[in-house]
Amino acid sequence: MGFMDKVMPRFVPSSEPMGPTQGLLTAMVTPFIADGSVNEDAAVAIGRHLLANGSHGLVIAGTTGESATLGDDEQISLVRLMAAELGEEGTIVAGAGSNDTRHAVHLTEQAVEAGAEAVLSVTPYYNKPNRRGLVRHFEAVAGAAGGRPVILYNIPGRTALNMPPDLLAELAQIDGVDAVKQANGAELQLVDGLDVLAGDDPLLARCLDMGGTGGICVSSHIAGSEMRRMYDEPEARAEIDASLQDVYRVLFCTANPIPVKTALGMLGHDVGGLRLPLVDADDDERALIREMLERHRLLHSHPPAPSQPVPTR
């Protein structure tokens, strides 16, 4: 039985104000049109849909938003657009990380000026700085944020560099470093001085159970109302989490955001294709995604949308 088969209370927006490092934040996809440029109208539409279906806020131009293939101008323009159009409806967090401190500082300054309420700053990747270098890097980023919260992003599977809990506690001493998006499940724990957000969808229930403040998630693109109930209804959390395990698994059956963009297209959302080196889901992956959507009764009222490939820039 899928989660849509069960008779459950519908998501009702909370009247409680949320901080930018709390609640269910969706790492939003970036829609493209056929010529490969950002589809601004579709971005506002999908953002509004997410905020109306469980998300407290949005992370713009993160990994799921294909930040690696967005130019700086595209990234900041998208943050500015979403803050202007949707900032009154939910939190807008901007991805602003880089393995070049000068670039991270520039992106952070620009994102804050564009209206971001917080910035997500990933561990510097590839050049693998030591502990002293990490401290200095995030001191510079926090200074550039000008008082807006900085959310550290620990994802060693992508960066080849882990920030252990004792280092996170040290970074928490930097003024403005307020939270961590923790994608290393082996070290998911509370950290003195930081809000802890689940950085991998299957970690959300465990993070909330231990006292974390929320999660930055991908599956909330299609299961946002149920994931929001995990935040609002602790007594139902375990059951909901169990019902979503196959959603988490299928939406990461290949490189993110390939599956979630495919799923959104099948549900009728205009998200377009992907920028190389990411490519469209193959037939086997599409079948797996379709089966999951059908299993959870998500396709019955949404005709599939045709996939539009995005050409190389």
Image: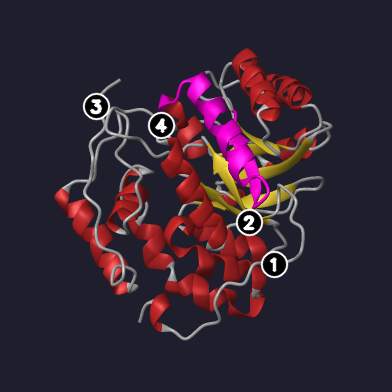
Q: Residues within 10 Å of mark 2 (few under 14, many from 20)?
A: many
Task: Read off the magenta span.
Answer: 69-96
- Which residue matches tag 2? 56
- Which residue matches tag 1? 14
Indicate the quadrant containing the C terminus: top left, top right, bottom left or bottom right: top left
Residue 105 visible in this rendered orientation of the protein: yes
Q: Name the amino acid, label 4.
A: Val
Q: How far is disc 2 from disc 3 in space, using C-alphas?
A: 33 Å
Q: How far is disc 2 from disc 1 in space, using C-alphas?
A: 9 Å
Q: Counting residues from the N terminus, which is met first, the one under dot 2 or under dot 3?
A: 2
Where residue 166 appears, as percent x and y from the top left, is 74, 40
Q: Counting residues from the N terminus, which is met first, the one under dot 4 or under dot 1?
A: 1
The reply, left or right, for residue 164 in relation to residue 146 is left
Q: Residue 236 sits in which quadrant?
A: bottom right
Camera-near label (2 vs 4) is: 4
Where residue 159 appears, as percent x and y from the top left, is 50, 31
Q: Name the amino acid, label 2.
A: His
Extreme residue toward the left, this view: 283
Q: Residue 292 sits in which quadrant?
A: bottom left
Question: In percent of the image, x 57 and y 26: which residue is there?
Answer: 76
Q: Does the magenta stretch include residue 232?
A: no
- SS for callout 2: loop
Q: Counting residues from the N terminus, which is met first, the one under dot 3 or under dot 4?
A: 4
The reply, left or right, for residue 266 in relation to residue 201 is left
